[in-house]
Amino acid sequence: MSHTVSVRQLAQVEPARLAAIVAAHSPEAIAWLRAAASQSVPRAQAILGQRLLFGEGCAADAGEAVHWLELAAQADDLHAVNLMGRCCEHGWGRQRDTTMAVYWYRLAASRGLDWGMYNLANLMMSGAGVDVDRATALSWYRRAADMGHAKSINVLGRFFEEGWEVATDLERAVALYRQAALGGDFRGQFNYARLLLARGQRALALEWLRRIPDTATPAFRHNVRAWLQRSSDVTLRALADETVWQEAGQ
C-alpha cells in the first residue's frame, strides 16, 4: 500500500498524533517523515535517514539515507552528525572514509553528544582515520560515561581492568561493569558476569549471562556461546545449549 502525505496534512496534524505515527516504525510513519523532511525539518530528515539506513518500516536504502542525514547534519542535528560518521566509517551509502568519520564524530563529540564521544574514542583506540591516542580516548570515554552512556562506562571498566592509562583497579572495574550492565549494555553484562565468576559469585553471574541474548548482536552472541562451550563448568556449557545461544550459532 502506498502512503503519501500532503503539505496541508502535515500543517494540520496535531503534534501528539504525529509523534504517535512516527513512533510506530511503519510505512505510514515513513510517509509523514518524508513530508516533514521535504519541508526542511532537520529532526524529520535525521529520523528518516536513520529509518532508511537500517530498513525500519521501509526497505533499506543507504544512498537515500545519506542524502537526508547530510541535510540534517548541515542543520546541526547532532544525531545526524554522528550517523554521518558511522556512514563514513562503515561505507554505508558512500565510500568508506575513516578520516571523514573522525571529522563527523569529533564534531558531534565537541558539541556534547555522548555517542559522538564514544565513536570518536573507539577510532582513537584503533588508530582508524586518526593516530592511536589512548589517553585522549580515555578522556572522551570518561565524558560520555559521566553522561550515563552505558557502552562508554563498559569501556572505562576495561581501562581499569587492564591498567590502560590508569592504575589497575579491579574493584573499580567491577563497579563500572555492573553500572554498564544495569544500563543495558550487553558487553558490560558479559564483563560483569565474567568477573563475578572469577570471584566465585556463580549464581549472580549466570543471571547476567542469561540477559545477554536479549540485546546482543548475533556476532556477540555467537562469540559468547563459544566462550561458554569452552568452559570447564558444566552449568556454563549447558547454558550454551539453550535455544537463544543455539540461534546465535546458526
Image (spheres, rainbow, N blue to C red):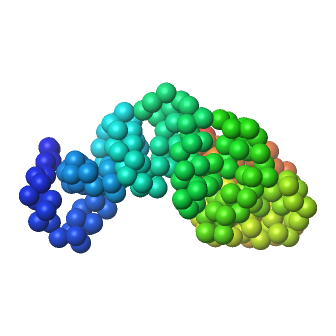
Residue depicted at 79% across the width and 52% down the height = 135
Quarter of the image for the C terminus: give it.
top right
Residue depicted at 56% across the width and 31% down the height = 97
Residue 94 drawn above or below residue 40: above
Q: Point out the residue furthest to the left here.
A: 8
Residue depicted at 40% across the width and 47% down the height = 74
**Residue 206 as seen in the image, left or right of residue 232:** left
Q: Point out the residue furthest to the right here.
A: 167
Residue 38 location, x and y as percent? Answer: 22, 47
Residue 93 location, x and y as percent? Answer: 42, 32
- Residue 191 seen from this side: no
Residue 192 location, x and y as percent? Answer: 75, 63
**Residue 154 as seen in the image, left or right of residue 48:** right
The quadrant where residue 147 appears: bottom right
Count up the numbered dots.
0
Query: In this orientation, which residue lies closer to the viewer: 228 or 165?
Result: 165
